[in-house]
Every structure is written in C-alpha cells, then in structure tokens.
Image (cartoon, rainbow, N blue to C red):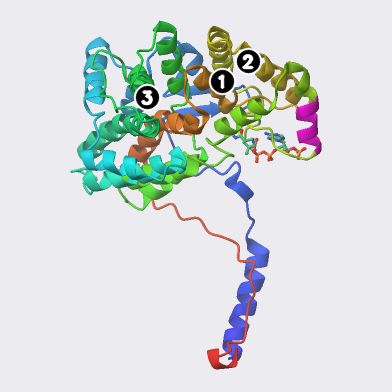
Amino acid sequence: MSTVKNTSEKTEKMEKKEKTVVRGLEDIVAAETGVSYVDGVNGALYYAGYNVHDLAGRTSYEETIHLLWYGELPNRIELADFRSRLVSEMRLPSQVIRMIELAPPNSHPMAVLRSIVSALGMFDPDVENNTLEANQRKAVRLTAQIPTIIADLHRVRTHQPVLSPDPHLGFAPNFLYMFRGSLPDQEETEAIDLCMMLHADHGLNASTFAARVTASTKSDMHAAITSAIATLKGPLHGGANQRVMEMLNRIDDVDEVKAYIEGMLDEKKRIMGFGHRVYKTEDPRAKHLRNISESLCHRANQGHLYEISHRIEQVVRKAKGIYPNVDFYSATVQHALGIPKEYFTTVFAASRISGWIAHILEQYADNRLIRPTSKYTGQYGRTFVPIEKR
Ligand code: COA
C-alpha cells in the first residue's frame, strides 16, 4: 500500500515539474509538409510553392487538386484526363442514395455528409488496401462523390429528382448544376471554381490535423476523411460560414451594424468569420472572396448583404484589430450562388478534401503514429472502496 503511495507521490511531483501544456498546440510543429504554406505574418498562402494570388482566377479547382496531389499543375492533356476521371466517378451506389433519403429531415447536412462518407468506405472495393495506387484511386472517387452527396441531399430534401453529372462541365460547376438543377453561367462558373480553389488547403488546420492523426494509425482514407469532416463541422472552424449568414440575416440595414457588432463585443461574443490562429494580417483568400461577393451579390439583387458585410469588416477591424477570414465573404458568395446556408460548410468540405487527401498521402508516405502526451491534473493515491461500502 505504502509503495503505491510513494510511487504516486513521485509521479505527482514529476508531472508538476516537467510538463508544460501548450493549449491548442499553438505554434507546435507537428508535421512536415510540401502541400501548402501559410505565411501568417505577411498574409500569404502558397499551394506547393505557388502564391494563391497567382493561381486565383487562372486555374480551375481540378487543376489545384492535381497540384496538391501530384505536386505539379497539369498540362492540357493531363487536365482533360483528370477532369474526366473526376466527373466519371461522381455517381453514388444506389444503396448510398437510399441512405441519404433515409437521413432524418432535420439532421444537419454536415452530419449527413460525415455519415455518408463513412458509409461509402463500406462500398469501396479498395477500402482496406493502403497501397499508393489504391489510395490514389480512392482519392479520385471520394473527392468526386462528395459534391454528389451534397447535391443529392439537397435535391431529396427539396423533393426534386437527383441529377447525373454533365460530362461537358468542369468539376466545380458540375456540383452547382447537380445541386441547383440549372446550368451555371460564366460568372457563376468562375466564382464556384475560385471559391473551391481558395478553400483547397491551409496548412495544418484542425481538420487536416484530425485527418493526419487518423491516417497515422494506418487507418483507411475514408476513416481519415470522416474524422476531418467531423472536425470541420465546428463553428470555430468550417462551421463559421453558416454562422456568418445567420448574423447577416439578423441585421436589416447597414446603419444597424455598428450597434450590433459593438453589442456583441461588449458581451464578449465572437464575431463569426473574423480572426485567425495564424494570420496576423488579412487572410489572402478574403480579398478574392470579397471581390466575388461584391459582384455576385449585386448581380443577385442582394447588394445590401455585401454592404452590411463590408461595414461589419470596418467596425470589427476598428474595435478589435482583426480581419475577415476565409469564412466571412464565402458566406455571401455561396448565398448569391443559390446555396442555402446549412450547406455552406459542406461546400467547404467538398473543397478541403483535396488538401486533406494530399496530407493523408504525405502521412502514409512517411508515417509515425501521432500520439502526444498530456499533463495529468487529476487526483493521486486515492484509497479504493469496494462497491458494497460505497
Ligand atoms: N470575434 C471577436 N474577438 C475575436 C475573434 C472574433 N471572431 N477572434 C479573435 N478574437 C479576439 C479574442 O477575443 C482575443 O482578444 P483578447 O486578447 O482581447 O481577449 C484575441 O482576438 C485573440 O483570440 P484567440 O482566441 O487567442 O485566437 P485563437 O487563435 O484561439 O482563435 C479563432 C482563432 C479562429 C478560433 C478565432 O479567431 C475565432 O473564434 N473566430 C471566429 C470563428 C471563425 O471565424 N472561425 C473560422 C476560422 S477560419
């Protein structure tokens, strides 16, 4: 008995002395990556060495996926082949469509997406095959299937027939077509491509870390993507874009913005779509999304939403010195494209899957189990009481 007590006293002393907890793992370097680099000081983002400002408006989403997975932008022949492989894999097994139909009508689209991606693993012929070749096949399939899950869920819930992809359309506009049932025009095509391209990867963010942790146990790709979707769902991460729209819906006029935001800040509430763990200046993605938001909102007779957003940006910046992140203007971009707010985070997932997969492939290629430690703050040396005496 006394040996046990001495041991626990020693352990207690050690725990108190030696371990420093880094809350939120801030600034901890947990992986090496060649996928993307977030320069928080200068407000820059690089995909495999390319500044996103150079890619924005000049590359489609599928060119970006190719870059993240294979390290190079595709030439025309490679792009045509990659695009047709993606579009041809957009179909879902009929049992999976049935599962989508069976999802409780009020369940959140991110919860459905998470569950269906997990279920898709059971239908994938390569699910337990962790070779590079099998993982590359699964990468194409999963990336192609996610937009279809989102589109089908929306169509089922709005009592409209589900649609097959149009082989003449690119990957991102195909999603918009299958979701809405109308062909996107040139401006909408460019907007959805740019929006998805800008969300493709972002260093070791929370959902990417979750994907890498799962992959590091040598679990399968579907499992790793399921973890990532579950993590993206939270309002401090990808779930923020839906909350941005909810906030915009609570403000009727530009003149109300100052009082509304100041009231929120007085109550120590977070303004969704603002602030960032890494950027100390403007998020480079916000600049592009702001431009598309302005143009699409005015075109859709929703100019007031852009004006309110812009005013919020000014007020928050003055009051807190923080800037909009990727989620702030992506809310109005998606709204103007005809996507209901409950689906915003799923569209983020349909984009970020490209980055998740690139990181999962990196993790498999040079794996070490990710297993940090914790500082125990519980009790020591308690005396056991048998159940009949408790
Ligand atoms: N609204 C109001 N204040 C905010 C804020 C926000 N959105 N984001 C950060 N701040 C403030 C904090 O209150 C804190 O101020 P203080 O020093 O006066 O207390 C300071 O900025 C630092 O915040 P901190 O919580 O340490 O930053 P973090 O790195 O832990 O948080 C986020 C990063 C993204 C979680 C945070 O900015 C946030 O909650 N944003 C809203 C959710 C969101 O948009 N998420 C999407 C991220 S892409």
Foreground of the two, 216 or 232: 232
Image quadrant holding the C terminus, namely bottom right
Relative to 3, say whether 104 is above or below. Answer: above
Q: Earlier in the sequence, mark 2 or mark 3?
A: 3
Tell me the distance, in whole angstroms, between the alpha carbons under discs 2 and 1: 7 Å
Relative to 140, say whether 207 is above or below. Answer: below
The kind of residue on which mark 1 rests is: Thr
- Residue under label 1, please give it: 332
* Magenta highlight range: 259-266
Q: Residue at x 56, y 30 (%)?
A: 241
* Rendered-image quarter of ligand 1: top right
Does residue 62 appear to the left or right of 255 in the view shown?
A: left
- Few, some or many residues within 10 Å of mark 2 (<14, 14–19, 20+): many
Q: Is residue 173 visible?
A: yes
Q: Is residue 228 visible?
A: no
Does residue 259 appear to the left or right of 14 in the view shown?
A: right
Relative to 175, say whether 384 is above or below. Answer: below
- Residue under label 2, please give it: 306
Tell me the distance, in whole angstroms, between the alpha carbons under discs 2 and 3: 24 Å
Tell me the distance, in whole angstroms, between the alpha carbons under discs 1 and 3: 17 Å
Residue 54 x/y as whole percent = 47, 12
- Few, some or many residues within 10 Å of mark 3 (<14, 14–19, 20+): many
Foreground of the two, 258 or 204: 258
The kind of residue on which mark 2 rests is: Tyr
Image quadrant holding the N terminus, namely bottom right
The kind of residue on which mark 3 rests is: Phe
Does residue 166 appear to the left or right of 4 in the view shown?
A: left
